[in-house]
């Protein structure tokens, strides 16, 4: 058995550079600040960072609207700073995965500007157009309640363009071979700058057939092999971690039956059912989800997670289960989002109850797969429900009880730091927790060490052991 697939025994830590550490007092986190925190991350014991989008962007969807794939947004630093960062991470044995957001671009991307301006431009066919409003324009929105349609009219192009997400995120025509070649070029570029792979955004939509006449979009799974082959050829230990919230029956299509497609996928099935199990004090939904997602090729791996930067999507649960999870963890409408999910952080969902948090994290670190934690969860950070949509769970890291949690010297952080109340930086911060052996931070450090010492959790098979009912 091959036992050196690094991603099978990794602990992945997800962070966004803009909210981690500000080094120059402009209120926005940056690569220099992140560099200063690499030893903290090394001490915590994580082995890989998933860095959220940092490329040039108008930032209308937290960087998931890219306007230049080959540059660092100047707010965060320069390409030079980025390479210092990947180098610093490498010196500490930490790998870096970055987001690859190629289902769509920003509408400010020069490709889109050119495409809308000139029908004869080669970029016209890099996007999806229709002369008339397509009949299914009011279907398939990813952000229901906020996003009105999937097709918008562009007055300059005098045509409609397709956008699976917000209207400022026109979909790329990913079936176009030129677009595919560009995607490989983007991957090749960042590999050269020191990354070990990509968290690929919105994979089912990337590989889907798109167009005004597409009645039932179909996934073109062969594209996944095409991406992987390129990566393996350029750098053998590079991986793709796919964001694909799909049903278990298609999992093997994503992994490939010979393990020739995606190396890793987030396990959305286990994620949703884990919360259903917690809400109902009944392990059966979780067991069912674990069994349903058991088949996978030997080299493939699940990414296990509790919460991420998006809403906790409960769309795959039954209505009754979803209501039960809402009632337990997000009883008021302002805690819910898009009619299907919860926008809170984990700690407030569990009332900051240390025993329940430890239970949830014990599951995260022992379920089959590789754990993916989110910055601040090691401290039990909270959310700020005053911020719109998913932004409530994207507040700056709380480092100390200095002003603005030690995140910035600025009087006005770009995103407010959580202050006051049970989750304010005054109480919940890394500096205080460092000094208490029993803090959640030190507990997390220990469970990470444990996880790394027991590789069979990531590698091994599992069996469900019937439990004794002791009430
Ligand atoms: C999934 C990302 O996680 C989310 O934050 C983003 O809004 C959409 N993809 C669109 O890129
Ligand atoms: Ca800064």
Image: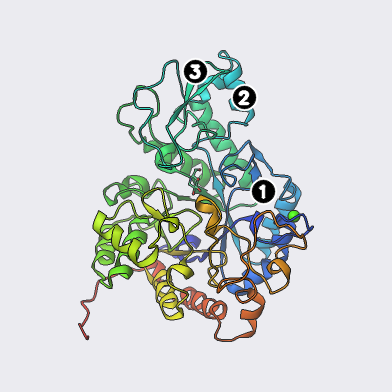
Q: Quadrant of the N terminus?
A: bottom left
Tag 1, which secondary structure?
loop
Res 113 label: 2
| Distance in Å between CA atoms under marks 2 and 1 | 28 Å
Splitting the image into 4 quarters, where does residue 156 fall? top right
Kindly tell me whether mark 3's CB lies below 8 Å from ligand 1. Answer: no
**Does 426 sit left or right of 198 as displayed?**
right
Q: Is mark 2 within 8 Å of ligand 1?
A: no
| Closer to viewer: mark 1 or mark 3 | 3
Please state the quadrant of the image where ligand 2 appears.
bottom right
- Residue occupying image coordinates x 54% and y 57%: 392
Residue in view at x 73 percent, y 45 percent:
74
Sequence-wise, which precedes: disc 2 or disc 1? 2
Residue furthest right in the image:
24
Q: Residues within 10 Å of mark 2 (few under 14, many from 20)?
A: some
- The numbered dot on residue 99 is none
**Which of pointers 2 and 1 indicates the residue nearer the eye?**
2
> To which quarter of the image does residue 64 belong?
top right
Mark 1 vs 3: CB contact within 8 A = no
Name the foreground residue: 199 vs 196: 199
Tally of numbered discs: 3
Determine whether the residue tagged by mark 3 lies in a helix, strand or loop.
strand
Q: Position of residue 41 (x, y in %)?
A: 62, 69
Q: Which residue, given by chain and number where applicable, does mark 1 sit on?
A: 193
Residue 373 as seen in the image, left or right of residue 402: left
| Protein image colouring | rainbow
In this view of the protein, can residue 294 be seen by the observer? no
Residue 87 visible somewhere in the drawing:
yes
Q: Which residue is mark 3?
A: 159
């Amino acid at each position: 058995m091959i036992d050196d697939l690094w991603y099978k025994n990794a602990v992945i830590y997800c962070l966004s550079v803009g909210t981690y550490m500000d080094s120059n007092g402009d209120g926005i986190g940056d690569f220099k600040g992140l560099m200063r925190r690499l030893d903290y991350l090394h001490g915590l014991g994580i082995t890989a960072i998933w860095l959220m989008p940092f490329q040039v962007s108008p930032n209308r969807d937290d960087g998931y609207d890219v306007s230049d794939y080959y540059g660092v947004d100047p707010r965060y630093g320069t390409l030079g700073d980025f390479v210092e960062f990947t180098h610093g991470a490498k010196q500490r044995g930490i790998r870096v995965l970055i987001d690859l957001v190629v289902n769509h671009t920003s509408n400010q991307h020069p490709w889109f500007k050119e495409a809308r301006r000139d029908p004869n431009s080669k970029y016209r066919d890099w996007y999806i157009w229709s002369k008339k409003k397509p009949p299914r324009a009011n279907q398939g929105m990813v952000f229901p309640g906020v996003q009105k349609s999937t097709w918008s009219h562009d007055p300059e192009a005098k045509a409609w363009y397709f956008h699976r997400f917000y209207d400022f995120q026109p979909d790329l025509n990913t079936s176009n071979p030129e677009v595919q070649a560009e995607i490989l070029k983007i991957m090749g570029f960042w590999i050269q700058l020191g990354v070990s792979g990509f968290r690929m955004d919105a994979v089912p939509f990337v590989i889907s057939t798109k167009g005004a006449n597409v009645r039932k979009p179909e996934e073109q799974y062969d594209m996944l092999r095409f991406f992987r082959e390129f990566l393996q050829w350029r750098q053998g230990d590079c991986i793709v971690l796919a964001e694909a919230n799909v049903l278990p029956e298609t999992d093997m299509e994503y992994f490939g039956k010979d393990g020739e497609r995606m190396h890793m996928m987030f396990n959305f099935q286990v994620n949703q059912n884990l919360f259903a199990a917690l809400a109902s004090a009944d392990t059966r939904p979780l067991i069912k989800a674990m069994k349903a997602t058991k088949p996978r090729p030997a080299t493939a791996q699940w990414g296990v997670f509790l919460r991420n930067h998006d809403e906790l999507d409960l769309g795959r649960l039954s209505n009754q289960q979803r209501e039960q999870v809402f009632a337990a963890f997000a009883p008021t409408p302002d805690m819910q989002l898009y009619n299907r999910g919860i926008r809170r952080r984990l700690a407030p969902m569990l009332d900051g109850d240390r025993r329940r948090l430890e239970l949830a994290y014990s599951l995260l670190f022992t379920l089959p797969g590789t754990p993916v934690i989110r910055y601040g969860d090691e401290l039990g950070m909270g959310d700020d429900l005053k911020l719109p949509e998913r932004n409530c769970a994207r507040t700056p890291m709380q480092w100390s009880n200095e002003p603005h949690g030690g995140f910035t010297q600025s009087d006005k952080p770009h995103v407010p730091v959580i202050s006051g109340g049970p989750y304010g930086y005054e109480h919940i911060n890394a500096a205080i927790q460092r000094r208490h052996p029993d803090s959640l931070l030190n507990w997390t450090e220990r469970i990470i060490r444990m996880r790394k010492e027991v590789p069979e959790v990531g590698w091994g098979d599992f069996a469900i052991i019937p439990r004794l009912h002791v009430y």
